[in-house]
Amino acid sequence: QAGTPPEGLGANRDYNVDLIPKFIMATGNLTKMLLHTKVTRYLEFKSITGSYVYASGKVQKVPANPSEALASGLMGLFEKRRFRSFLIYVDAYKEEDPSTHAGRDLT
């Protein structure tokens, strides 16, 4: 029999631990196919508010913006700066505007 979770974790329906997470990109072909075939009547879609990993004996949030990247304990100092720069680049990127490609040939 499973025990009860610690009260500090909140109600058990407030979170889900999935050993094999399944992500579907919101604008991907799979989503379009599911909508077209009306199978979505039997599925439930939810947007995620964050991703977490278990590292160094504790649960830590995966950084999703530049300020979280700098505060994260998952990476070293140089990794934090590189990841922050990557997030800023991705946020500013526009496919039709070559000035946002930072000199990279993305063809």
Image (cartoon, rainbow, N blue to C red):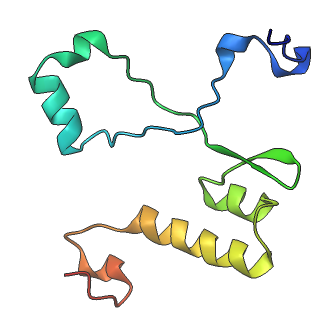
Q: Is residue 32 left or right of residue 105?
A: left
Q: Residue at x 83, y 21 (%)?
A: 9
The answer to whether 87 is drawn above or below residue 25 in the figure is below
Quick one: quadrant of the N terminus? top right
Measured from the top left, where is residue 100 in percent x and y? Answer: 34, 77
The answer to whether 46 is drawn above or below residue 1 in the figure is below
Most foreground residue, 44 or 82: 44
Measured from the top left, where is residue 93 in percent x and y? Answer: 36, 68
Q: Is residue 42 left or right of residue 1?
A: left
Q: Quadrant of residue 4?
A: top right
Q: Residue at x 79, y 59 (%)?
A: 71
Measured from the top left, where is residue 61 in percent x and y? Answer: 71, 46
Q: Residue at x 24, y 68 (%)?
A: 95
Farthest left residue in view: 36
The answer to whether 67 is drawn above or below residue 23 in the figure is below
Q: Residue at x 18, y 27 (%)?
A: 34
Q: Is residue 39 left or right of residue 102?
A: left
Measured from the top left, where is residue 63 in percent x and y? Answer: 65, 54
Most foreground residue, 54 or 50: 54
